[in-house]
Image: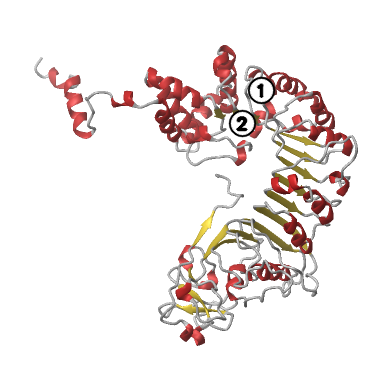
Amino acid sequence: MGFMKRFRRAKSPKNKDLRARDDLHFPVYHGPDQSQRLDDKILRRIFEFVCPHTTDETLEPSEESGHDGCMTCDMRDLAHCALTKRQWYGVAAGLLYRSIRIDAVHYCELEEVYAEERKRKSRGGDEVDPPTLRLQQLCRTVRENHYIGSRVRLLKLPYMTRESCKADLARTVSVCPNLEYIDLPDGFFSGDPSCHTLRQELQARCPHIRKTKFNEGGEQALESLLHGYWQELRVIEMNKIQIEPSILRRVFGVLPWLSEVSFTSISWMNDSIFHSAPGIPEFPALDTLKLNKISGITAEGVVQYLENPVCRDALRTLKIKDCARLPVSSLHNILGMATSLETLEYTATVSAALPIDPLPPMTSRTLGKLNYEIISNSANQLYPPGASYYQYLTNSLMSGALPSLRQLYVRDPDFPESLTLAPPIRPFADSPAHNPRGFNQPLEVFSKGLDELEWIFTSIIPADGYGRRGSMSGGRPLSSYSASKGLGPQWGGDARKSVVVPNGFGGFLAVPAESERPRSAGNLGPSSSYGHAHSHSLGNGIRASWMSHQKRSSRADLWR
């Protein structure tokens, strides 16, 4: 018997010993529960950090409104918080069912584990699509508890889930009366008969919808808004629709909360859409107007729309993309009328340079963000036509016509350098409102080429009174480059830096810092540099500010 005792399993330590051993590594608080002192407002703020996507109130689809981390795991953690204490349940459950997001995969290491488990189960013929299963579970929950269904405001789903689960979507929205936004299948916006039940449920049960879209074939659904559906719509997108302009204006007239309208590839649309007509409501005063591939609208039509003081004061964002009759030469007229405009996005593909006749500069005292993306459609790479358009932008900046501009996006990787090397522009005699001191505000420039996916960030900070070199420098930008934070290969290795300073004659010099010379893009050899001969212009009284560079993720990033 004594010999057999050696093969017996050793007894596990008592629970008391285990607890004592764990306390050595993970101290446990044994005092009073201090969380009882937290009110609901503080608890809600804590739970928002546990599951950040519950604070998402954007009216954007699931693909464009992601957050860092794994949203599915965050939702699981918030659900555990709701079950931890009775005091926490109401706050956590309110967040859990307010902005719901269903993802196709886990954005963490757990996806590998679950993928392997699903692979093993699928061998037996029981293949299950996880987002479909989660949608069905959500449908069951909100239908069994209508109080939870009334909490739902936003519901975001993967593309394939909303395309293949239309019946489940219809059953879910039928018990969510306060729903404001939901990701819908493409057929819903083009009049697909398979989405008829889903549309009926949304129109009958969800009167608070804030955003919708109408594609070609959805004209009847657009006209149905005249019957009083979705009176709280804020955002409408229209793509290739064929409808009478008078009916469109009447639809806009019954939507008092409408603030953003997007028109895309509508061939019949022209300036008459903004004209006044007896018995027809006026074109609404919008916060955001988007025009994409609209060839019939001209600058005169936009100016006529902005002549209405209500429309002029309301418009904050204007986006123009590939509109043939809205050229760059007409932007100064539009900006002159849009006195409250804060964001302008202009995208165009050009095949000819601007005429040599001088153009008035783009002038706006309120514009804070400008997307100026000019793409050259020419085989002649030696003299691309887009260069004259960026020169026009440089002249507008140097003339002091955009004093509130803080963010600038351009499709020219060399634009930050050309901006700092450009000579000052004399103020226009016929424009007394222009700032005679020229370019003198801090500016963030995001630039990239046609073959690049990431924006290169450049911060330009103008020199103060200590950095001026006489009256001719005029408060020119004074900054430094850092190649280690995102500059192109023409600036050399990882540790190379260069300082951009005024030369006292209206131009700029790139002075190597600590014998480090920037190299030109054409010759990456060590002997290629510029600005070295004028390095003496960096006076003792100059106080250089840093121009930071870092790569920002582009819109094409899959994991954003």
What residue sits right under mark 2 in the picture? 157
Among the 4 quarters of the image, the one containing residue 247: top right
Nearest to the observer: residue 368 or residue 314? 314
Residue 203 drawn above or below residue 456: above
Query: Residue 248: x percent and y percent?
Result: 84, 36
Looking at the image, residue 221 lies above or below residue 454 = above
Percent position of residue 404, x then y: 60, 59
The figure's colour scheme reads secondary structure
The reply to whether the C-beta atoms of the residues labelled 1 and 2 are less than 8 Å apart is yes
Q: Which quadrant: the C terminus?
A: top right
The answer, for residue 490, to whether it is visible in the render is: yes
Residue 127 seen in the current view: no
Q: Is residue 453 left or right of residue 190?
A: left
Q: Which mark is residue 258?
A: none
Question: Which residue type carries mark 1?
Answer: Leu
Q: Residues within 10 Å of mark 2 (few under 14, many from 20)?
A: many
Name the N-terminal-most of marks 1 and 2. 2
Distance, label 1 to label 2, CA atoms, is 10 Å
Mark 1 Cα-neighbour bin, 10 Å: few <14, some 14–19, many ≥20:
many
Q: Which mark is residue 169?
A: 1
